[in-house]
Amino acid sequence: MRKTYTSAYKAKVILEVLREEQTLSQIAGKYEIHPNQLTRWRKGVIEGLPVLLEDRRKKESEDKETRELVQELYAQIGELTAKLNWLKKKSGIDVE
């Protein structure tokens, strides 16, 4: 059966790995976790740090801009759909 670890447990272990007070093998033995697993966890943490440290105000601003753009595009779709239906009606093409 596969072991599962809570994120709090993983964080505790990875903080110990990042402190580098013991070797990876020593920490792996202490917690009975394969060294390759610790390496993957450490890599994931290091790769995720930029996202974690991003400026939230900038992200909120980008989210607002995206919502406004989507709203504008939906309005254009509605307008174009109405024009298309009008043209179909005027040209005698069957409108469903």
Image (spheres, rainbow, N blue to C red):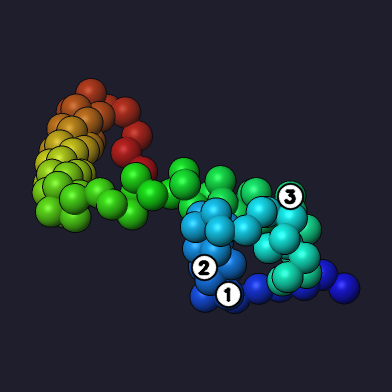
Q: Are marks 1 and 2 in contact (CB under 8 Å)?
A: yes
Q: Where is residue 60 in the image (x, y as percent from the top left)?
A: 16, 54
Q: Mark 3 points at which residue?
A: 36
Label number found at residue 9? 1
Specify the quadrant that holds the C terminus: top left
- The residue positioned 19% from the left and 27% from the top of the image is 87
Q: Give residue 52's position: percent from left, percent from top.
A: 33, 54
The front one of 53 and 66 is: 53
Left or right: residue 86 versus residue 40 is left
Q: Quickly name the residue at label 2.
A: 11
Please identify the quadrant where the N terminus is shown. bottom right
* Residue 84 vertical placement versus 69 (above, below): above
In this view, the residue in front, 19 or 34, is 19
Residue at (34, 48) in percent of width and height: 51
Q: Where is residue 24 in the image (x, y as percent from the top left)?
A: 68, 54
Q: In which quarter of the image is residue 10?
A: bottom right
Q: Is mark 3 on a helix, strand or loop?
A: helix
Category of crowding for the residue at label 2, using alpha-carbon neighbours closer than 10 angstroms: few (below 14), some (14–19), many (at least 20):
some
Q: Residues within 10 Å of mark 3 (few under 14, many from 20)?
A: few
Query: Dots 3 and 1: beta carbons under 8 Å?
Result: no
